[in-house]
């Protein structure tokens, strides 16, 4: 993955970085938010993009 398009996804419950993803920053200006499985919480929670 390219470093300039790489983003970190952090769990909103436990505040741990669990996933890395990529996005097109030219078309998506807002922060990305996805429902993902958190290994630490053991459930599906929302994950927000961090810097």
Image: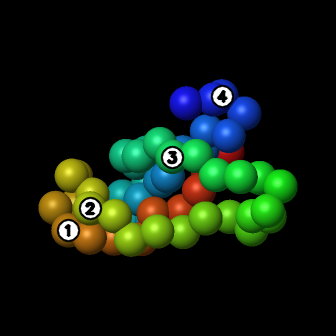
What residue sits 64% from the left and 52% below the top?
23
Relative side of 35 to 24, left or right: left
Give the labeled residue for mark 1. Answer: 43
Give the labeled residue for mark 4. Answer: 3
25 versus 47 height, above or below: above
x, y (%) of residue 32?
A: 61, 65
Q: Which mark is residue 4?
A: none
Give the labeled residue for mark 3. Answer: 21
Relative side of 5 to 33, left or right: right
What is the count of numbered marks?
4
46 versus 3 height, above or below: below
x, y (%) of residue 9?
A: 49, 52
Label 2, secondary structure: give it. Answer: strand
* Marks 1 and 2 in Cβ contact (< 8 Å): yes
| Circle 1 residues within 10 Å: few <14, some 14–19, many ≥20 | few
* Marks 1 and 4 in Cβ contact (< 8 Å): no
Label 4, secondary structure: give it. Answer: helix
Check the picture and name the quadrant holding the N terminus. top right
Give the labeled residue for mark 2. Answer: 37
Distance from the alpha carbon under mark 4 to that under mark 3: 10 Å
* Marks 1 and 3 in Cβ contact (< 8 Å): no
For marks 1 and 2, the one nearer the N-term is 2
Distance from the alpha carbon under mark 4 to that under mark 2: 24 Å
Relative depth, front residue between 37 and 14: 37
Distance from the alpha carbon under mark 1 to that under mark 4: 29 Å
* Marks 2 and 3 in Cβ contact (< 8 Å): no
For marks 1 and 4, the one nearer the N-term is 4
Label 1, secondary structure: give it. Answer: strand
Residue 17, quarter of the rendered image: top left
């Amino acid at each position: 993955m390219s470093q300039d398009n790489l983003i970190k996804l952090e769990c909103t419950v436990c505040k741990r970085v669990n996933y890395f993803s990529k996005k097109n920053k030219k078309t998506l200006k807002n922060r990305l938010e996805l429902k993902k499985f958190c290994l630490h919480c053991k459930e599906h929670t929302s994950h927000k993009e961090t810097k």
